[in-house]
Amino acid sequence: GDKVKQSPSALSLQEGTNSALRCNFSIAATTVQWFLQNPRGSLINLFYLVPGTKENGRLKSAFDSKESYSTLHIRDAQLEDSGTYFCAAERNMGYKLTFGTGTSLLVDP
Amino acid sequence: NTKITQSPRYLILGRANKSLECEQHLGHNAMYWYKQSAEKPPELMFLYNLKQLIRNETVPSRFIPECPDSSKLLLHISAVDPEDSAVYFCASSPDSFSGNTLYFGEGSRLIVV
């Protein structure tokens, strides 16, 4: 079965609103990374997380290893936030990231 | 992102041989090839650390990686198949051990006709 599930699979937001994306793991994740794949196809690293939280501008992410999930909060969504968001989890068995299936986000004016 | 450069950016092939190239200017020890098919997440193909191949996922034998030095990575593809149509991303991280942020290049889009 899917080891890293992301929800929702797709999301449409109005500019200026807030939202949360979620990643659930069926593996014992030790670290999590969040990426944005923009409409041009570039993969941009947003966060690298051990258990805890991080914030960067309008983005905030949390990782709870005991409950096996991670979240990405987007505040005051902008048009340039559109794209596909991937979370990727690492297990403590050698370095390999397991990617989730992604959340496709569209921000409308 | 000009710190990890890939070439060519676009490639249209029949059943021919071709090599993809990647160079990173981040001083990282680990370099990766990922394949991303349409509407799918990236999938790891190969991982090198300090020029040594340390991960080789289940990849057809027509894909042969090469790491001539720790900042350069090549992917040789022979007799491409239509299922090889995808974007191939090069990536790097400080090293291959646990706990390293992954950075991607811009990708090379391969279209097999």
Image (cartoon, rainbow, N blue to C red):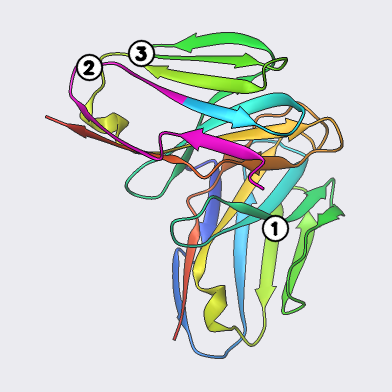
Label 3, on which residue? A58
Coordinates of residue A51 in the picture (x, y in percent): 68, 13
The numbered mark 2 sits on a residue in which chain? Answer: A
Q: Distance between the residues labelled 3 and 2?
A: 11 Å
Q: Which three-letter amino acid code belongs to the residue tagged 2?
A: Thr
Residue B15 visible in rendering = yes
Q: Farthest residue toward the left?
A: A109
Coordinates of residue B81 in the picture (x, y in percent): 58, 84
The numbered mark 3 sits on a residue in which chain? Answer: A
Q: Is residue A17 left or right of residue B83?
A: left
Mark 3: which secondary structure? loop
The residue sitting at 32% across, 13% down in the picture is: A75
Q: Do the residues labelled 3 and 2 touch (CB within 8 Å)?
A: no
Can you tell which quarter of the image residue B69 is in? bottom right
Q: How far apart are marks 2 and 1 (CA)?
A: 42 Å
Residue B71 visible in rendering = no
Mark 2: which secondary structure? loop
| Of the two numbered discs 2 and 1 in the rendering, the one whose residue sits closer to the viewer | 2
Residue A93 circle label: none
Q: What stretch is highlighted in magenta?
A: A1-21
Mark toward the start of the polypeptide (3 vs 2)? 2
Q: Do the residues labelled 2 and 1 touch (CB within 8 Å)?
A: no
The residue sitting at 61% across, 35% down in the picture is: A88
| Of the two numbered discs 3 and 2 in the rendering, the one whose residue sits closer to the viewer | 2
Q: Distance between the residues labelled 3 and 1?
A: 35 Å
Q: In this view, does A82 lie to the left or right of A103?
A: left
Residue A17 circle label: 2
Residue B20 lies, with reference to residue A14, above or below; the image says: below
Q: In which quarter of the image is the C terminus of chain B?
A: bottom left
